[in-house]
Image (cartoon, rainbow, N blue to C red):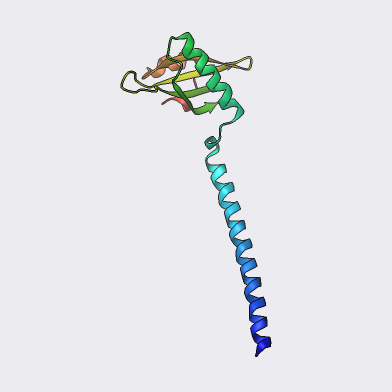
Amino acid sequence: MHLAVSRGNAHNRNMKTRNRSACLALLLILLTAALAISPRTCASGDDAAIIAGTKKYLAAESYPSDMKVTVEKVAGDYARVAITPKDPTKMDGAIAFLKREHGTWKGLTIGTGWDPADLAKLHIPKSLLP
């Protein structure tokens, strides 16, 4: 009878090892799928450059320096960013469009609403329209 108990314990250890391996594999698959579905969750090097270009543009347009900048979408050499004030009771948020020129992101326009024809004149891709 002791032999059967020992065999049962060995069998349970093998099952635990297989269950851990299966759980780890499932976790890796889910993590990979999540990253593939939502590539914008992690800031890329481009995001940092876009944010820096936006802050420079905001300073040139006399916006406060404490505005929060969030990259919403990038299409080729164009980007759309959301701009949120530190105190939304004093100022409205805005959307800005930027273009990469010679490796540097430069502001094209900022505001809360646009005529699509105006954005088309700036060659902003339709995929970036709010």
Q: Residue at x 67, y 81 (%)?
A: 7
Foreground of the two, 50 or 123 = 50
Q: Residue at x 61, y 57 (%)?
A: 24
Q: Is residue 3 left or right of residue 128?
A: right
Q: Is residue 101 visible?
A: yes
Q: Is residue 87 left or right of residue 4?
A: left
x and y, in percent, of residue 40 in the image: 53, 35
When asked about the image quadrant of residue 110, the answer is top left
Quadrant into which the N terminus falls: bottom right
**79 over 108 or under it: above or below:** below
x and y, in percent, of residue 49 in the image: 58, 22
Residue lying at the far left of the rendered structure: 89
Residue lying at the far front of the rendered structure: 2
**Total of numbered circles in the picture?**
0
Q: Residue at x 55, y 19 (%)?
A: 52
When asked about the image quadrant of residue 76, the answer is top right
Foreground of the two, 2 or 41 = 2
x and y, in percent, of residue 55 in the image: 50, 17
Q: Is residue 77 visible?
A: no
x and y, in percent, of residue 20 in the image: 61, 63
**109 over 27 or under it: above or below:** above
Foreground of the two, 108 or 90 = 90
Residue lying at the far bottom of the rendered structure: 1
